[in-house]
Image: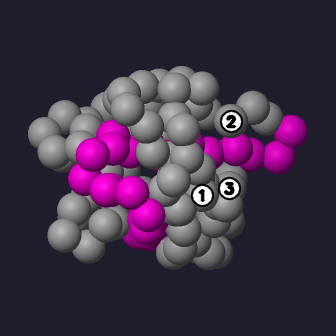
Amino acid sequence: QVQLVESGGGLVQAGGSLRLSCAASGRAFANYNMGWFRQAPGKEREFVAAITWSGGTTRYADSVKGRFTISRDNAKNTVYLRMNSLKPEDTAVYYCAAGNSISYYGRDYDYWGQGTQVTVSS
């Protein structure tokens, strides 16, 4: 089992920045690839970014490429999502997830956090 706890969400104006953190406990964090997903009200959950266990490979949704950066610190059992140039359409609950593949699909992740709300005002 891996327990994941997100933090760092909040209210920010358009153009602003936030850094989300996802702290892991339980089984070896460094063994897992990690992903960030988001879900806006009335919409399906969507992929945001993912990173391999080593941090050597990252993937991003087209909608966030160039604005968001995923990173991880295996010594701290934490994965981060740095979000710059935020837009109102980035408003959503953001979830981190752990799995054995670096995937765009939520079904490929085994463990999920409870989510953190990000609200971007115009």
Is residue 66 rendered to the left or right of residue 61?
left
Look at mark 3 in the image and give the residue it sits on.
Answer: 93
Q: Nearer the viewer, residue 20 or 78?
A: 78
Q: Amino acid at mark 1?
A: Gly
Which of the two labelled residues, at mark 3 and mark 2, occupies the earlier sequence position? 2
Helix, strand or loop at label 2? It is loop
Query: Do callouts 3 and 1 mark residues in contact (Cβ within 8 Å)?
Result: no
Residue at label 2? 45
Q: Earlier in the sequence, mark 3 or mark 1?
A: 3
**Where is residue 34 shown, x and y percent of the image?**
38, 45
Write the start and end of the magenta stretch as one range. Answer: 18-42
Q: Can residue 85 be found in the magenta stretch?
A: no
Mark 1 lies on residue: 113
Query: Which colour scheme appears in the figure?
Result: one colour
Q: Nearer the viewer, residue 44 or 119?
A: 44
Q: Which residue is painted at 45% across and 45% down in the image? A: 98
Horizontally, residue 82 falls left or right of residue 90, namely left
Mark 3 in CB contact with mark 2 (< 8 angstroms)? no
The residues tagged by marks 2 and 1 sit, at their Cα atoms, a distance apart of: 14 Å
> Which one is earlier in the sequence, the residue at label 2 or at label 1?
2
Element carrying mark 1: loop
